[in-house]
Image: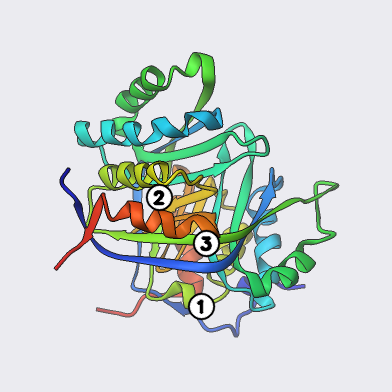
Amino acid sequence: MNSPADSPSMAKIQLHNILCAGEQALITLRLDGHRAGFLPSIFYAFREEGIPLSFILLSLDQKGGLILNLILRSEDLGWARAALREGLDLSSIGMMEIREQAALITLYGPHLGEKPGVAARMTSSLAKDEVEVLALSASINSCLILVPGESSSRALQSLRRVFEIPPG
Amino acid sequence: MKKIQIAGLRQALHLSQIEILSLPGGTRALARVLDPLAESGINLEFVAFHGGPKVSPDLILGVHRNQVVATLGLLKGKTEEGRALEIRCREPAGMISLFPHGNRPAVVGDFLAAFREAEVDIWALGFSLSALSALGEESRIPRVLVALKDFFELAG
């Protein structure tokens, strides 16, 4: 069975824009669920330090533990890693993994939530072009995809085959 | 406490959170899960896919409750790398989306603090370009909306 991205006759989905930011790092934290109360203070620390976050994902694992993914500029990784280790006492209650040299691609609306199949078109096309998706978030008016930095050009080409940005 | 000005707030009720846990097979597997849902017209209010460098990622979907049976039917029996998909469904779920003007870390901090103040667990959270969205137990969403008013105000 062909995937949606394989169909040559399928009309492209119109977007406002596709943006790509390189030099991103992914921090994955796995924490005891009881540590959720500490999360606001983590983000306040980022604010105080003036460190922007490109992308955040949080969910619960099978045992009720927290999986938190933070995507930030590579230049901020050193500070973030040290602050999280210290602030969360990771040696005793959780673990942290780092993925460097990633690129964040943003697909921006309009009204993506009213168009079923946007995420499928996106992932089918990326799968066909053998682009690894490290993380993905899609909601009302945008989709964010984190890919390995070396794949970013291929990912953009792939996405431009299925999405259209009006000129001007 | 100074409230953060936001552009909007949206709630969506009558949802279910469907989780495909430890999905092996990378982007191709992700496409194999999402393609049939798209072909069947399943509208996903929320999609998050994440894990870590050393573990298979989880796929979290926010689906309208009237499409849950169809969604689970499409996922049932699917296998990846020789094993059945591990699927979990949390319901009834509701989703709150907050549209900030900027300053993401501060917004996320206060957003999480509002959930904490309302004593509501976040089942999943995603921050896209312009909206911060969180899923939680539907009946508790009104408590969160009240708590959010302590931290945020609509601009203008």
The chain identifier of the residue carrying mark 2 reads: A
Report whether residue B128 is seen: no
What amino acid is found at the position of numbered circle 3 in the picture? Answer: Gly
Residue at left 43%, top 66%? B11
| Residue under disc 2 on the same chain as residue under disc 3 | no
Q: CA distance from mark 1 to mark 3?
A: 20 Å
User: Closer to the camera, B27 or B7?
Assistant: B7
Question: Considering depth in this image, is B145 or A98 the residue closer to the camera?
Answer: B145
Chain at numbered mark 1: A
Which residue is the site of mark 2? A104
Residue A47: image quadrant is top left
Q: Is residue A31 visible?
A: yes
Q: Are marks 1 and 2 in contact (CB under 8 Å)?
A: no
The residue that label 1 is drawn on is A115
Residue located 25% across and 54% down the image: B152
Q: Is residue A53 above or below residue B66?
A: above
